Image: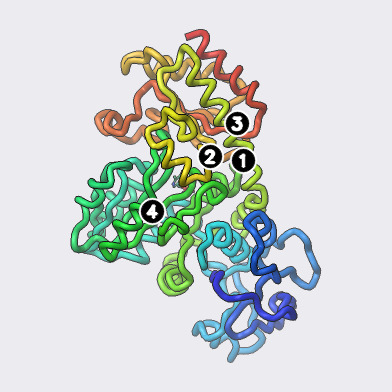
């Protein structure tokens, strides 16, 4: 799972690893793809992984196996004792999963990565690995709803306390620090209001306090934003979203230092088993090959749609980091490589809380192209009413505080022709 070690000698093509019943894995390292040291992101997105098997497959192999064979009992003993790196059991080591981990680590610019069964289980693994009863977390109150439930509800039960603060007001983060604060958790941009927090500033606050910073990078993906470069210690992913990119599988990952991945998270994975299935890892692995071109195209589409919506007479407000009207526009452009991302939210005009839901439902129900689903990151554009779906478990007061009004609609722009998407939304907007 470690991405830190240099490529082994050119002869280490990986054939040893997959040579049937007698894999002669090397002590101290599963071989690496023999890529130039200075290979760039778009190259790594397609090429990083593991060397091919002796069959010379060009597309990465899918290793559907629970366990791996050892040449003799003594080798098995060394491998179980972690004295020799090799594949042992797919709960914590599998070649297809490792290919996905190496590729994602390369894209995020971290030493290592560990794949998990979902985005939520990545956050569970993060907290289980780093914290114990009596520790404290500071987290933005605008993060993904299930993240709030997990930290407050589940981990609260086990004695890990969380204080929720403003996404954008750094003084609230500082004021929430306690002597036992070990972790700061942020997500940027957020769902569905695309609020942007300052990752570099949060890293400074965390490190000044001897704490660590984790950033959920689902919405921007490493194609637009690389939090490790801004000082984040851990990057959380839901592979379900843009990494897969076609809405097929549930998957997750933590990216971080080799030391954390190998010594903190892998042992927890080994005993807890929130493991990523090799099939899902393979789908995400192949999805990452097109991540950069998809993000460029979907972001360009979203930017056009956001401008069109902002000019539409039936729209009260548009939330999109690429628009000048966005409160953190400049920060977003700096952090996200000058791109706003592919998610646009908007409030339908005159949608008071009484008729807001009816107006939003009217627009959603008049679409014929957009998929009515709360997922995002798909090549198919999705449309959702956050107040009754993703944020439906909140009380009305919590929703109001979070700005999730009844007239709010979120669109995650896919790869359809943008003129067709405008027409799809205009149908409802023009007949309100
Ligand atoms: C979807 C999502 C998650 C959870 O990921 P799953 O793969 O659905 O478990 C976490 N964070 C954000 C920002 C998400 O959008």
The tag earlier along the polypeptide, 1 or 4, is 4
| Ligand 1 within 8 angstroms of badge 3 C-beta | no
Q: CA–CA distance between discs 1 and 4?
A: 24 Å
Local secondary structure at mark 1:
helix
Q: Which residue lies furthest to the right in this view?
A: 55
Neighbour tally class for label 4: few under 14, some 14-19, many 20 plus, Cα within 10 Å: some
Neighbour tally class for label 3: few under 14, some 14-19, many 20 plus, Cα within 10 Å: many
Q: CA–CA distance between discs 4 and 2?
A: 18 Å
Report the mark closest to the observer, 1 or 4.
Answer: 4
The answer to the question of whether label 1 and label 2 lie on touching residues, with beta carbons closer than 8 A, is yes
Q: Name the residue under label 3.
A: 301
The tag earlier along the polypeptide, 1 or 2, is 1
Number of numbered tags placed on the structure image? 4
Q: Which residue lies furthest to the bottom in this view?
A: 74
Is 1 above or below relative to 286?
A: below
Q: Name the residue under label 1.
A: 296
| x then y, percent, for residue 276 | 54, 59
Dividing the picture into quarters, in which one does residue 87 lie?
A: bottom right
Is 77 above or below relative to 301?
A: below
Front residue of 328/29: it is: 328
| x then y, percent, for residue 174 | 23, 52
Give the label on residue 339, or none.
Answer: 2
Front residue of 276/377: it is: 377
The tag earlier along the polypeptide, 4 or 3, is 4
Q: Which residue lies furthest to the top in this view?
A: 431
Q: Residue visible at 54% across and 45% down?
A: 241
């Amino acid at each position: 799972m470690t991405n830190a070690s240099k490529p082994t000698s050119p002869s280490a093509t990986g054939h040893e690893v997959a040579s049937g019943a007698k894999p002669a894995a090397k002590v101290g390292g599963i071989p690496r793809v023999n890529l130039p040291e200075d290979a760039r992101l778009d190259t790594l997105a397609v090429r990083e992984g593991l060397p091919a098997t002796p069959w010379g497959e060009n597309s990465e192999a899918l290793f559907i196996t629970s366990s791996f064979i050892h040449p003799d009992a003594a080798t098995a003993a060394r491998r179980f004792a972690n004295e020799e790196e090799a594949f042992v059991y797919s709960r914590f080591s599998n070649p297809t999963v490792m290919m996905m981990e190496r590729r994602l680590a390369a894209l995020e610019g971290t030493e290592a990565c560990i794949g998990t069964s979902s985005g939520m289980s990545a956050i569970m693994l993060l907290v289980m690995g780093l914290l114990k009863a009596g520790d404290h977390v500071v987290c933005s109150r605008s993060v993904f709803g299930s993240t709030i439930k997990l930290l407050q509800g589940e981990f609260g039960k086990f004695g890990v306390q969380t204080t929720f603060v403003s996404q954008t007001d750094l003084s609230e983060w500082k004021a929430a620090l306690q002597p036992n604060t070990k972790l700061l958790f942020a997500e940027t941009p957020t769902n569905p209001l695309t609020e942007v927090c300052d990752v570099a500033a949060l890293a400074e606050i965390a490190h000044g306090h001897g704490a660590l910073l984790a950033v959920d990078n689902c919405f921007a993906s490493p194609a637009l934003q690389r939090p490790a470069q801004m000082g984040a210690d851990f990057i959380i992913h839901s592979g379900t979203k843009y990494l897969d990119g076609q809405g097929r599988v549930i998957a997750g990952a933590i990216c971080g230092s080799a030391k954390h991945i190998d010594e903190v998270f892998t042992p927890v994975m080994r005993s807890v088993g929130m493991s990523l299935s090799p099939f899902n890892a393979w789908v995400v692995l192949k999805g990452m090959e097109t991540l950069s071109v998809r993000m460029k195209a979907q972001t360009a589409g979203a930017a056009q749609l956001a401008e069109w919506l902002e000019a539409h007479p039936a729209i009260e407000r548009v939330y999109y980091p690429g628009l000048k009207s966005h409160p953190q526009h400049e920060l977003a452009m700096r952090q996200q490589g000058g791109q706003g991302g592919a998610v646009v939210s908007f409030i339908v005009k005159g949608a008071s809380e009484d008729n807001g839901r009816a107006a939003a439902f009217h627009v959603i129900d008049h679409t014929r192209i957009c998929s009515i689903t709360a997922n995002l990151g798909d090549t198919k554009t999705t449309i959702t009413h956050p107040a009754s779906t993703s944020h439906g478990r909140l009380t009305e007061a919590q929703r109001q505080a979070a700005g999730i009004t009844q007239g709010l609609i979120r669109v995650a722009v896919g790869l359809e022709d943008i003129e067709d998407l405008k027409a799809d939304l205009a149908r409802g907007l023009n007949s309100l």
